[in-house]
Image (cartoon, helix red, strand yellow):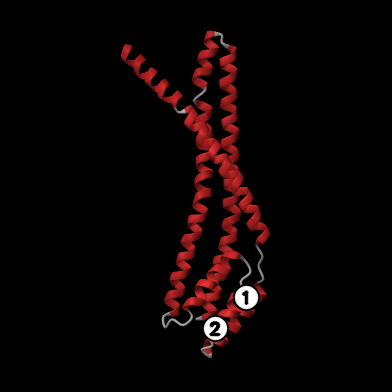
Amino acid sequence: MDASAGIIGAMFMISNSLLYPVIIILLGLVAWSLISVGQFLSEYASRSRDMAKLKAGCRNAHEHIQKQEYMKAADVLNASGSNELLKNFIADLVETLRESKFSVEAEKLLQDYELRITKELEKARLVAKLGPMFGLMGTLIPLGPALMGLTSGDIQQLATNMVVAFSTTVLGLLTGGIAYAIVVVKKRWYTQDLSDMEYVVEVLR
């Protein structure tokens, strides 16, 4: 009986010791979410897509490449990008126009940008999962002291712990929801960008 009481006591102590670290992590996730919303809105405002301009630029660049007019091809391509990620890709791509193995270099560049996009989305995916997890931990941890306060008649302790429990739930769901929404929208954006990048490479080959 003493052994089981000791184990339960140790579990209770460890659980309670995690409360403040969990709250600090949740506050950090909330701060990250607010910053990410600002970055997301900024990127949304700056995004545009002009496929006609991109197609015309790629065709003209291809003609210049056939004539070995690489500087003109580079200028035309740089002017055809319609958003920041695509512009960066084109800027990197034009450096390989003179390469004898252009197709290989272009394919490697595409793969690098795919990894870059995956890395960018990984942060939001992680927060989308961690937010609700830490929110649940922040909900369950105060319930033990709350129940003890209930049995001892300490209503103040019960109320305080319940406020903490519900607050952490809300924060966890908030960060998870924001991160999930960012992942969904950005994934669509970057999938379209990758499609445009592949189009550019195929036309120039």
Q: Quadrant of residue 72?
A: bottom right
Residue 82 lies, with reference to residue 182, above or below; the image says below
Give percent across and percent down for residue 163.
60, 24
Towards the viewer: 162 or 28: 28
Residue at position x 52%, y 29% in the image: 138
Residue at position x 56%, y 62% in the image: 191
Q: Marks 1/2: CA distance?
A: 12 Å
Element under disc 2: helix
Give percent across and percent down for residue 201.
52, 76
Residue at position x 59%, y 65% in the image: 84
Kind of residue at disc 1? Ala
Question: In the rendered view of the protein, which quadrant contains the N terminus?
Answer: top left
Residue identified by numbered label 2: 71
Residue at position x 46%, y 61% in the image: 115
Residue identified by numbered label 1: 79
Residue 103 lies, with reference to residue 69, above or below; the image says above
Q: Quadrant of residue 45?
A: bottom right
Give percent across and percent down for residue 75.
59, 80
Kind of residue at disc 2? Met
Give percent across and percent down for residue 161.
56, 21
